[in-house]
Image (tube, helix red, strand yellow):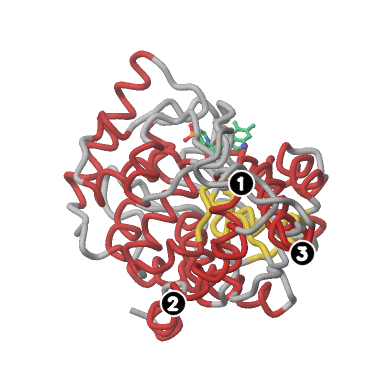
Amino acid sequence: MGKTLQATIDGVEPVRRKWRERAREHLDNLAIPPGSLGDLLDLAEQLAAVKQSLKPSVRKKTVVTMAGDHGVTGEGVSAFPREVTLQMVANFVAGGAAINVLAGVAGARVLVVDMGVAADLDNSIKEKILSCKVDYGTRNMAAGPAMTREQAVQSLETGIEIAGRLAGEGVELLATGDMGIGNTTPSSAILAAITGRSAREVTGRGTGVTGDDLENKIRVIQKALEVNNPDPKDPVDVLAKVGGFEIGGIAGLILGAAYHRVPVVVDGFISSAGALLAKSLAPASVDYMIAGHRSMESGHRYMLEELGLKPLLNLNLRLGEGTGAALAMNLVESAAQVINKMLTFEDAGVSRNTPGAPA
Ligand SMILES: Cc1cc2ncn([C@H]3O[C@H](COP(=O)(O)O)[C@@H](O)[C@H]3O)c2cc1C
Ligand SMILES: O=C(O)c1cccnc1
């Protein structure tokens, strides 16, 4: 299993009920009609419980965008060529991608990680990212396992180590992101493997495959599941057989965040595949997850259902990179400021409602 992985799984504790109750009691006394800040109050309660504080801070924010390539792109599952993964990593470094812009608005740093891009990166790029390459892309999962079990553990442990390093640097809120042409295919396969849903139910258009190409993508996913027969009870087996290096990195990042009690905003379809693996490895890790948004990718709703998470936003996004999570970070900051700064009825000198009195 890997010592770091096992120790992390063992160390993920559910958030304490006592802290949830304490936070709720305070939130119930804020000078507003009870419950009128809606889901923001649930989020504030979660932050307080995760951080064991009625003044949780999420000021220092980092989006971790994990990049990797996929052998299965040889089967024609994406509308874009594989080189785009490397080209987009360069774009992230240049600051010109959607994630750079949206993380900038949220006041978050973007940390790009090479988990398995199928090329050697220029030194000028390497200086500005984390190089954790497990291999030069995965193997074609329609023909056999995407990676070895050792590589699956390595990708999970890399994510765990990055979360630990960032927590040590004082990062208070993490978000997950991905870049990897073809990666909606392994994400769908992970969803199918874990939930038992059919390839057709879990497969969507990704970057925009339609018609016969979409039928081909469904067949490729079906074949990968048949050829590899991943064990739904063994998330490391699922990752090894039908996963990806960046997806393992994301799952590890989430586990590490939970271990260090740092809340983590989960992005769309690919990140949620990582979250499914994290939940399967350590069920209590969901207490630390915040679903940033509901992706347009069909099948994402099944992931959210399986995770038991309600997405904060629904903006018809289908990009990845961490964009939906970065947008949601603004709401997480808002929830933190609500519990930190708002006054109670008593402190603000505002009269409470009178039960039974006409409104
Ligand atoms: C220019 C470009 C930028 C992207 N940024 C994220 N993705 C997204 O699209 C890919 C997944 O879709 P599929 O499985 O269909 O390949 C991933 O790289 C994901 O991050 C992008 C895709 C493209 C083309
Ligand atoms: O939801 C996502 O993360 C997503 C959906 C389609 C393509 N790329 C990413």
Dot 3 or dot 2, earlier in sequence: 2
| 21 in relation to 289, above or below | below
Mark 1 falls on what kind of element? loop
How far apart, in angstroms, are the residues tagged by discs 3 and 1?
A: 38 Å
Residue 293 in percent (x, y) is at 54, 39
Residue 272 in percent (x, y) is at 45, 48
Quadrant of residue 212 within the rendered picture:
top left
Left of 97 or right of it: where is 298? left
Quickly name the residue at label 2. Answer: 12
Quadrant of residue 204 within the rendered picture:
top left
Mark 2 falls on what kind of element? loop
In the image as oriented, which residue stretches furthest toward the top?
211
**Mark 3 CB lies closer than 8 A to ligand 2:** no
| 190 in relation to 152, above or below | above
Instruction: Tell me, yes or no, if residue 57 can be seen here.
Output: yes
Quickly name the residue at label 1. Answer: 353
Quadrant of residue 23 within the rendered picture:
bottom right
| 137 in relation to 223, above or below | below
Between tags 3 and 1, which lies in front? 1
Answer whether labels 3 and 1 touch (C-beta < 8 Å).
no
Q: Amino acid at mark 1?
A: Asn
Q: Amino acid at mark 3?
A: Lys
Mark 3 falls on what kind of element? loop
Of the 4 image quadrants, the one containing the C terminus is top right
Circle 1 crowding by C-alpha within 10 Å: few under 14, some 14–19, many from 20: few
Dot 3 or dot 1, earlier in sequence: 3
Quickly name the residue at label 3. Answer: 60
Q: Residue at x 37, y 20 (%)?
A: 213
Residue 55 in percent (x, y) is at 71, 70
